[in-house]
Image: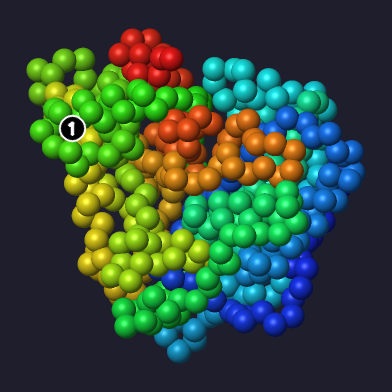
C-alpha cells in the first residue's frame, strides 16, 4: 500500500437528530444476503482546488454532516437480535446516529498523473485511498456504515467513500454522493429525499428475516483462499464504438432487442474468454464443453408492478446468470453472447422478485464471496446510469472514478459512465496473463480505438 499520512479523524453525526421518523429499519432479503460480502468502495479524483486546504476540509465535513441529516440511517449501526424462541438471528438498521467516519489524509508523493497515466490501475495507490479494506458488512454492528477518506495529493484530491453494502446498493451510494456534492457546491440540495419505508414488501413477506443458526465468521473465515495475483485496467469505449457493437449484435441475431450495454458486455464476455486461452480451436470437444458464466446485477426497482423509487434506501437488486459452454460462446460470437445476456435480464420479472423474496424467507442463504465467483466466470456490478461525473463539489468535475479493493476477484467488471457523453468505462479485474492477451487482441483493442 502507498504511504498515507493521516491528518485527522472525525466521527460526523447528522446535523439535526431531532424528529427523525425512523429509529429502526429491518433488513430485507436483498440486504441480508450481503452480510458476508465486502463493502461498496468508490471514489472520485479531482484536480487540486484553489481553496485553502483547512477551509476545504472543514467545508466538506460540514456539507457531509448536512447530507447525513438527510440520509440519517447511514449514521447508525447494524443491530443484531437473537431470537431465543426459535434459535434464529435477525438483523436491522439501528438509526442511533452513532456517526460516520471522516478522515483527512495526505499522499505527499502521489500526483494525479500517477493514478491516471499507467495502463494498469496502480492498486497500491488506489486501495490506500479508501477506508475499511477487507471489512465485511456484518461488521457494521460495531463499525461505521459510511466512511470517507479525503486524501490530499501533490496536485489533486481524492474523495474515497465506503458504504456498508447491507444497508444500500449502488443507487443509494451515488444518491448520497450526488446529494453531498450538490450541498457542497450550492449550499442546498434539489435531489429528492431518500425513502426508508419497507412498505413495498407488504403482502409478500414479513419482516424481520429470521436466520437459523447464524454463526459469525472467525478470523480464519475472513481470510480468502489464496488468489492468483490480479491486476486492473480501465477499458474506455466511445459512443460511436458502442453503437457499432450494438448494431452488429442485433444484426447477427436478426433482432432489435439487444441494448448498448448488453452488446458491450457480450463483447467483453467473448473477448475475455478468448483471452483466457480456455480453448485454442472450436474443434476441441472437451474444452468446448467447459462452462462459462456471466453474473449480472439487475436492478429490480422498475420491475415491480408499482415501481420502487430510486430514492429507496436499501438494496433492490437481483442476480441473473447467463450460462453456456466456452465452445458455444466463442463459436456464437458477439450476437450470441449479447442475446444470452438479454434473455437473462428479461427473466428478472416481478414474479422472479417475489419468488426470490419468498424463497429467501423460507431458506435464508448467505453466500460467501468465494462461493459466488467460479473459474471462467465474469460478473458486472454498478451501472452507467449512475451520475458519476456530475459530482462537482464546487471546484469542478472529477477527472476519474476508481473503486477500492472490496469484492475484487478474477472476472469482476465494474461499469461506469465515461467522462464523455455516451461513453462507457469498464474497470476489469483479471489475471495479468488475461490482461496481456487482451492487449494483444487486435480485434478487442480496435473496439476502443479513437
Does residue 368 show up? yes
Report the residue at 9% width, 17% height from top. 283
Q: Quadrant of the N terminus?
A: top right
Q: Nearer the viewer, residue 375 or 317?
A: 317
Counting from the top left corner in percent of width and height, residue 206 is at 38, 82
Q: Nearer the viewer, residue 155 or 35?
A: 155
Q: Quadrant of residue 46?
A: top right
Q: Which residue is mark 1?
A: 250
Counting from the top left corner in percent of width and height, residue 216 is at 53, 64
Report the residue at 78% width, 68% height from top. 15
Report the residue at 33% width, 46% height from top. 296
Counting from the top left corner in percent of width and height, residue 29 is at 40, 68
Q: Callout 1: helix, strand or loop?
A: helix
Q: Quadrant of the C terminus?
A: top left
10 Å crowding of disc 1: few (<14), some (14-19), many (20+): many
Q: Quadrant of residue 447?
A: top left
Residue furthest out toward the bottom: 85
Amino acid at each position: 500500500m502507498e504511504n498515507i499520512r493521516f491528518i485527522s479523524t472525525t466521527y460526523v453525526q447528522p446535523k439535526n437528530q431531532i424528529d427523525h421518523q425512523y429509529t429502526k429499519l429491518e433488513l430485507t432479503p436483498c440486504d441480508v444476503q450481503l452480510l458476508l460480502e465486502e463493502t461498496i468502495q468508490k471514489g472520485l479524483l479531482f484536480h487540486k482546488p484553489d481553496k485553502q486546504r483547512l477551509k476545504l476540509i472543514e467545508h466538506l465535513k460540514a456539507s457531509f454532516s448536512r447530507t447525513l441529516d438527510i440520509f440519517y440511517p447511514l449514521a447508525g449501526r447494524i443491530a443484531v437480535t437473537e431470537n431465543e424462541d426459535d434459535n434464529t438471528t435477525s438483523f436491522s438498521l439501528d438509526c442511533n446516529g452513532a456517526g460516520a467516519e471522516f478522515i483527512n489524509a495526505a499522499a505527499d508523493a502521489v500526483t494525479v498523473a500517477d493514478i491516471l497515466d499507467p495502463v494498469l490501475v496502480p492498486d497500491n495507490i488506489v486501495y490506500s485511498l479508501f477506508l475499511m479494506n477487507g471489512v465485511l458488512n456484518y461488521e457494521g454492528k460495531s463499525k461505521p456504515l459510511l466512511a470517507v477518506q479525503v486524501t490530499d495529493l501533490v496536485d489533486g484530491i481524492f474523495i474515497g467513500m465506503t458504504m456498508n453494502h447491507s444497508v444500500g446498493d449502488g443507487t443509494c451510494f451515488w444518491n448520497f454522493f450526488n446529494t453531498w456534492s450538490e450541498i457542497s457546491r450550492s449550499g442546498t440540495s434539489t435531489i429528492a429525499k431518500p425513502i426508508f419505508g419497507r412498505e413495498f414488501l407488504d403482502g409478500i413477506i414479513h419482516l424481520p428475516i429470521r436466520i437459523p443458526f447464524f454463526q459469525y465468521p472467525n478470523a480464519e473465515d475472513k481470510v480468502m483462499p489464496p488468489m492468483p495475483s490480479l491486476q486492473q485496467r480501465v477499458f474506455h469505449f466511445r459512443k460511436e464504438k458502442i453503437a457499432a457493437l450494438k448494431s452488429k449484435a442485433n444484426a447477427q441475431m436478426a433482432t432489435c432487442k439487444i441494448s448498448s450495454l448488453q452488446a458491450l458486455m457480450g463483447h467483453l464476455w467473448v473477448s475475455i474468454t478468448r483471452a483466457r486461452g480456455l480453448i485454442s480451436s472450436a474443434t476441441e470437444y472437451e474444452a468446448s464443453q467447459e462452462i462459462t458464466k456471466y453474473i449480472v446485477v439487475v436492478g429490480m426497482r422498475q420491475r415491480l408492478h408499482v415501481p420502487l423509487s430510486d430514492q429507496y434506501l436499501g438494496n433492490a437488486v437481483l442476480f441473473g446468470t447467463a450460462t453456456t459452454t466456452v465452445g458455444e460462446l466463442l463459436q456464437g460470437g458477439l450476437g450470441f453472447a449479447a442475446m444470452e445476456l438479454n434473455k437473462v435480464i428479461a427473466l428478472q420479472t416481478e414474479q422472479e422478485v417475489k419468488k426470490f423474496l419468498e424463497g429467501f424467507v423460507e431458506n435464508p442463504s448467505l453466500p460467501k464471496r468465494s462461493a459466488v465467483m467460479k473459474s471462467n466466470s465474469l460478473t458486472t456490478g454498478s451501472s452507467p446510469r449512475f451520475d458519476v461525473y456530475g459530482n462537482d463539489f464546487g471546484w469542478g468535475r472529477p477527472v476519474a472514478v476508481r473503486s477500492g479493493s472490496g469484492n475484487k476477484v478474477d472476472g469482476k467488471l465494474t461499469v461506469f459512465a465515461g467522462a464523455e457523453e455516451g461513453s462507457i468505462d469498464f474497470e476489469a479485474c483479471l489475471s495479468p496473463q488475461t490482461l496481456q492477451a487482451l492487449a494483444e487482441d487486435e480485434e478487442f483493442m480496435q473496439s476502443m480505438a479513437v
